[in-house]
Image: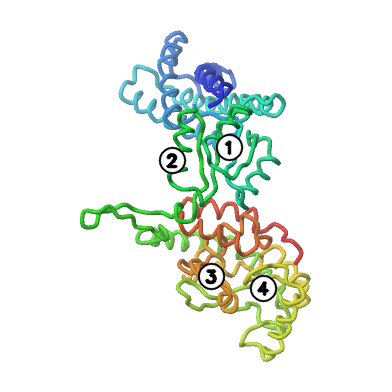
Amino acid sequence: MKKSELFFSAIQVPIDFLMLVLAAVSAYSIRNVPEILALKPKLYTFPFHSYIKIILMVAPVFIIIYAIEGLYDIRSTRKFWKEALKIFSATSIGLVIIIVAIFLKREWFSSRFVILAAWMIGTFYIVMARYLIQLIQKWLLRTRGIGVHKLLLIGKNGKMDTIFKIISQSPNMGYEVIDQIETASPHVIKGIQKEKGIDEIILCDPMITDAEQEKLIDFSAINNIEFKYIPTTLQTSKFTLGVLSGEPIIEVRNTPLEGWGKILKRIFDIIASTCGIIIASPIMLVTALAVHLDSEGPIIYKNERIGDNGKKFFVYKFRYMKWDCCVTKENENLEKAFDLEQELIEKQSVRKGPLYKIKDDPRKTRVGRFIEKYSIDELPQLFNVLFGSMSLVGPRPHQKREVEKYMEYHRRLLTIKPGVTGMAQISGRSDLDFENEYRLDLYYIENWSLWLDIQICLKTVGVLFNKRRNF
């Protein structure tokens, strides 16, 4: 941790203490406001000097809770909204402890109004104080370079080039790349440290041996340098430790979506899809009417896709193409529609890899262009989720001809149910190339949690109805 970060960490404790005391005093003062008294008269009076003694005893309890919750592990680059949620959570825990204590010893203090008011005001005061401190830290970071971490990158490849580019374009991240080298030689790194100084090292080079990496870790520890590395695919896999015939053994887990994980995800899918259908039903009814009036053909277009374990199923969508252009067995002009699609893919596809995306697709209807642009066409997939052929969150399902172009490792996408939305959709939607989409989906498969599903669904609410790029 930098000296500036240690300083701000140190002053955070007395500032939090002061904010808690001020919040308690504010709550006590509000209780005596005439307008408040008119709404809720005081049942008894409580001397301020006795009240403040209790507050001075209670405030350190909140400080201890904040420390346990990690609120003093401070860096200027932390995310403010996450810190605000932590403050609310920690203050709420403190409130529960106070309520229990008062229940056990009523003679201390029992004004429910003051307790609840102090909780709300205290949360607000502390959040605002920390916000101001963070503004000061970021200002010092940008204008004076105070708190900037000098970063050495080891490895020259696509991943490291991306990291270098992101850090160079984002000064608020709090990093300065002092060098990017290909060797992990302690002799070379010592020279860079003596000349420029090093606070952190990030390694991304699978060719470096275990012995070289061990020396690098030792060097970093001895010189008080933070050491980080970007792992290989195998290193990021989830695993469990066990013993077989007296020998330690590591079992690599494909996904947490096994056993109870699978059951929890299915329960979440049923509840969330049912709520989604109820909420979206007015939009779906209006869309169905618009599709029916705009062009001939069925309202719902059933498109065959490949699901988990290679099973075929139909994805439901509002039809946004002219019926004679739809590639489906129900279309009498199937052969002609297929030939047209192949021609458009060759001439106008803007995606690389096994997937295609046709720019300025002439097959779309007037209504179709609108509902596809705002993803309204995908709302019927909530019924896919309810019936069990899809999940709310997961890799997007692809057509058989697309799956046939997969590399062997891409088939890991078929190990769980496909989803209506996913990591790729909230990170770039159609703009991502297939390989990046695969990496995001693989991360989801290996790191699934119910909370991750909820986060993706919440982010999708903002992304789903945003205007798509004009393809």
Comparing 346 with 157, the one in front is 157
Seen from the viewer's position, the closer of residues 92 and 449 is 449
Mark 2 Cα-neighbour bin, 10 Å: few <14, some 14–19, many ≥20: few
How far is mark 3 from mark 2, CA to CA?
53 Å
As measured in the structure, the alpha-carbon distance from the residue carrying label 1 to the one carrying label 4 is 40 Å
Query: Which callout, 3 or 2, points to the residue nearer the camera?
Result: 2
Image side of residue 372 versus residue 441, left or right:
right
Between disc 2 and disc 1, whose residue precedes?
1
Q: Are marks 1 and 4 in contact (CB under 8 Å)?
A: no
Residue pointed to by mark 3: 383
* Marks 3/4: CA–CA distance: 15 Å
Q: Is residue 334 left or right of residue 53?
A: right
**Between marks 3 and 1 in the image, the one whose residue lies nearer the viewer:** 1
Q: Amino acid at mark 1?
A: Trp
Residue indicated by mark 1: 81
Provide the secondary structure element on which disc 3 rests: helix
Q: Is residue 449 visible?
A: no
Badge 1 marks a residue whose secondary structure is helix
Q: Mark 4 is on which residue type?
A: Ala
What secondary structure is marked by label 4?
helix
Near mark 1 (Cα within 10 A), the count class, few <14, some 14-19 or many ≥20, is few
Q: Which residue is mark 2?
A: 214
What residue is rendered at 25% in x and 54% in y? 247
